[in-house]
Amino acid sequence: MTALRGVIPPVCTPLTASGELDVPSLERLYGFLLDAGVHGLFVGGSTGEIGQLTDSVRAAALSVAVSTAAGQVPVLAGVIDMGTPRVVEHALTAQRLGADAVVATAPFYVRAGRPEVRAHFRLLASALEVPVVAYDIPANIGYKLPGDLVASLAHEGVIGALKDSSGDLESFRQVLADTSGLDFPCLTGSETLADLALAAGAHGIVPGLGNVDPHGFLRLYEHASRGDWDAARTEQARLTELFSIITVADPARIGPMSAALGAFKAALALRGVIDCPATFPPLLPLLPAEIEKISARLERS
Amino acid sequence: MTALRGVIPPVCTPLTASGELDVPSLERLYGFLLDAGVHGLFVGGSTGEIGQLTDSVRAAALSVAVSTAAGQVPVLAGVIDMGTPRVVEHALTAQRLGADAVVATAPFYVRAGRPEVRAHFRLLASALEVPVVAYDIPANIGYKLPGDLVASLAHEGVIGALKDSSGDLESFRQVLADTSGLDFPCLTGSETLADLALAAGAHGIVPGLGNVDPHGFLRLYEHASRGDWDAARTEQARLTELFSIITVADPARIGPMSAALGAFKAALALRGVIDCPATFPPLLPLLPAEIEKISARLERS
Amino acid sequence: MTALRGVIPPVCTPLTASGELDVPSLERLYGFLLDAGVHGLFVGGSTGEIGQLTDSVRAAALSVAVSTAAGQVPVLAGVIDMGTPRVVEHALTAQRLGADAVVATAPFYVRAGRPEVRAHFRLLASALEVPVVAYDIPANIGYKLPGDLVASLAHEGVIGALKDSSGDLESFRQVLADTSGLDFPCLTGSETLADLALAAGAHGIVPGLGNVDPHGFLRLYEHASRGDWDAARTEQARLTELFSIITVADPARIGPMSAALGAFKAALALRGVIDCPATFPPLLPLLPAEIEKISARLERS
Amino acid sequence: MTALRGVIPPVCTPLTASGELDVPSLERLYGFLLDAGVHGLFVGGSTGEIGQLTDSVRAAALSVAVSTAAGQVPVLAGVIDMGTPRVVEHALTAQRLGADAVVATAPFYVRAGRPEVRAHFRLLASALEVPVVAYDIPANIGYKLPGDLVASLAHEGVIGALKDSSGDLESFRQVLADTSGLDFPCLTGSETLADLALAAGAHGIVPGLGNVDPHGFLRLYEHASRGDWDAARTEQARLTELFSIITVADPARIGPMSAALGAFKAALALRGVIDCPATFPPLLPLLPAEIEKISARLERS
């Protein structure tokens, strides 16, 4: 797992105006990120709208990533689903398609308790040859993966890494402390606390905004790697300011995920990386005036 | 939708000891319920462990239901998944396999707001010929379907019925009042408030415990239909007592859903309806001593 | 405790326009309720804005209730506060001022667990001669009093009654079943499920809207007492319709409690029972146009 | 407000074995902290068990602090209560007793919305001459003070500082950014993220564990002030390890606050600073074997 370090963006999944997966845009996006120098690609995360992708779209997006990355950097595949049999099925497909690791949450919808969560990760790991990255994203699944359970599964060899999108740096730090002797990369999903997570010992960052500004997160990571915390903080402040593009939409009209994922895609379209800012249903589109604001903020950044 | 009345159990999905779908047991279970006189079958609800069923198991369980019901009573198919494209795909399959209606929750994982939830049901309905039943189950998806949104979608003709597993009788009652002029069946998923929900005007009940004791819920429904509320309350009290089988397991060892779904299946196995009490992963099995307790309570009931 | 039956409104606390306790209005309000025939007065509940009342206002409101009730009906005193020593202090004062029982929640702010909640009620009861009514109001204190703990404290003789404002009829019903052999009145705080709670066996109702329309709730209670559930349901439907006065305010301008308590007081002022619809800070006032709407709904009811 | 910097422990409130405020122990505790060099005293926070202190105990604890501090360092007084009139009353008392600032949460129990929270702080500030510190402690009051509202009230001059016990560094950082031009100290209540909060720009720290080990937090603060983040992190790791004293109690026997506040007091008693480790009801005592474990960890630290 030592390869899981640095900046690993959770890649957006571009659509055509008619609602199909836009493969040329996806290839350009992977290329844009790889050219910037990212250390890995995470396909099928929340930023990739994994909850809305049908199985065939998931497979296509992953295959393109594997062929584009061509072994230069690891490709992580999100295998997000509710219960263990469904997750195992996704994971076997991802492994077959060439993913270097799979990223799985605790079960959801099934209202699993701690014993069931442990059983879930054990069954998943035992079905696979590639490593399992535990994905802690309580805002999406309504369950916080307990830090001590993560550490215990790490010591048991069931999971090989953590992707923490909980925003709970206290728990994240505890996992870092409790797994310090292992080869167990801990990655943060935070856009706005990336410098602090790295200061706390995080091995890498998985920022959704990294689709839009991979160069900024790479600079941040390099500053942190050199221990230049002032420079890291300055870069972080710039990126946090840019992150405000997710708030331009009217919250009375569309929900926060429509606003956030629409903003990332609008920014990528404005930068010419992808063709169309459409998101998958049920997410709703930004208005032209909102995209104008994003354009202004991109230019200012 | 007038056909959606009465007792419509959310059917369990039996497994063989080796973890495969147990089709003969499933046929016996459908037959047991139909012989008892249930008014419909709901395949692929939470009690059916829908979150854990792979697509092929979902399809098999539904096909057996359609052929066993043979048009005598409606078959409802749960099409539970995260985002709209995935739900539409399940729904088209269910429609093709002969479901009389599909049962869908609001989106989850994607953190949809109210505008996205509305868009989700509209898109789903527009893709289908069979009606959509809205499934309100906040404990599983972390989102309470607002009563006024349900009523609005009902008036718009987007949804044809409600299955309410929220436990919130106040909201349920408001939907009943706000849709009183429509042909819009409102079903409750509660095992322990079925008599009160019927007193409030519910058109039907969808109790998980109805797998184990369909005759009791049918008696309760008949008492209520005749306005014999004392008899309904007495039957309800007996069923509520029986429902305590879901609490025999040690909560320090397994979670509440392992305990509840394991109890339903253990009771069905004890009654000779299905062969094996196994549940789908990540749910964990009951211990023999716990199954003994269930046996004792079944005999007492 | 047998005296705790029937309709026991949680009385509003009227203010003068300059923000002082309005004793003449309070006397008129108590008189209005007693003349209607209520079975008790609950002073210092959430509807009475207990969280905002200083100790001296609490004492004054209670003293006026005791002298106005003059022993005809029981007076219950809310002794709402965070930790045990503060609650005991309020309770001793209430006892001294003549309350027939005190109404206390689980501790809050202190983040008590189940063992601490049990200790809290035991300490409170041991300090008093009057009985303690347990007040279950999770929306206000962030803690649901577990039904089995209520039943256990009832059997132990620590608490003498339950006032349930949880909206959870399943838990309420379980307490009724588990205390059926005791003299342990169970009262519901619901405005809109009062008929169903009575059908489930509730001994009384404590509706905030009972300030505005005590006669309606008394009719509902009498219908239920005679087993005339159709008449009870019809009265309930009328009261539920009237209860919509709590939603006339613009939710973007003021919060739901400003809207609800302001509506009760506005209705009382419109009916001439109290002088001024003001609420205690931080609650914010209704606008004249909103009070117009309340007036129209009152006339229609 | 410029004086609010550095290490400001939220002071414990010692009891005698018979349950009275232990003034000599309290004086020794204040002296211990002042001798260590703390930059202020916060009396009446959650660590001080403010929710359980009667008004007379609150006043006594504050008076002793004011006289012991004797103007060397600022004394902050928690004025924690539910609704505005009660909070104002506490605040006027605290001001009269010599507090340099009062610390107030948003309203609770009353279910205030954003407009009411704003009104609450405005009314409180307008009633006082001393500044108001906003206290964000969602775990205790069930409400997260929105960062943008904090910044807005800061710019308006309503509040003079923030004490953030939310654990949400993202929101905390946003407040820091949005108030950067003001004299608006932002203090963190975290024991385990103190170094990261300081790296993010926090002006001070308010750690409950600072009662037990003020010297450690002072070293941490000094390292951070000099920009020596490696030394800060090392000290933080030692303090985080020591903080595990709050987890020695059996969670099946007593709740987490009994465990945490009991551990602080037990450690202070073991160090000879206070006489007795008792906490206020409803909190429950540690067992001797648990206190043994605390002793071992103190020696190891």
Image (tube, coloured by chain):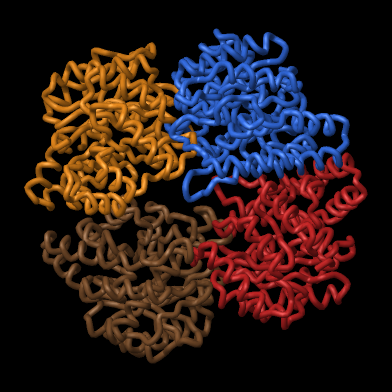
Chain colours: A orange, B blue, C red, D brown
Number of numbered discs: 0
Residue D262 vs B217, above or below: the answer is below
- Residue C91, visible in the rendered structure: yes
Q: Position of residue A139 (x, y in %)?
A: 41, 41
Taking depth in this image into account, of C54 and D282 the one nearest to the observer is: D282
Q: Furthest residue to the bottom? A: D24
Q: Residue at x 17, y 18 (%)?
A: A68
Q: On the image, which quarter does residue B232 sit in?
A: top right
Q: Is residue B19 left or right of residue D147?
A: right
Q: Position of residue C28 (x, y in %)?
A: 82, 68
Which quadrant of the rendered structure holds the N terminus of chain A? top left
- The residue under the point 58% across, 64% down is C281
Tell me the quarter of the image containing the C terminus of chain A. Answer: top left
Q: Going by the image, does D213 lie left or right of A84?
A: left
Residue ranking furthest to the right? C226
Could you say where residue D98 lies in the image, as x and y percent from the top left? 40, 84
Q: Residue at x 55, y 48 (%)?
A: C253
User: Is residue C34 placed above or below B299 in the rendered structure?
Assistant: below
Residue D242 to residue A252: above or below = below
Q: Quadrant of residue C131?
A: bottom right
> Looking at the picture, how far across and down is residue D281, in whole percent?
52, 75
Residue at position x 52%, y 73% in the image? D88
Q: Nearer the viewer, residue C50 or B7?
A: B7
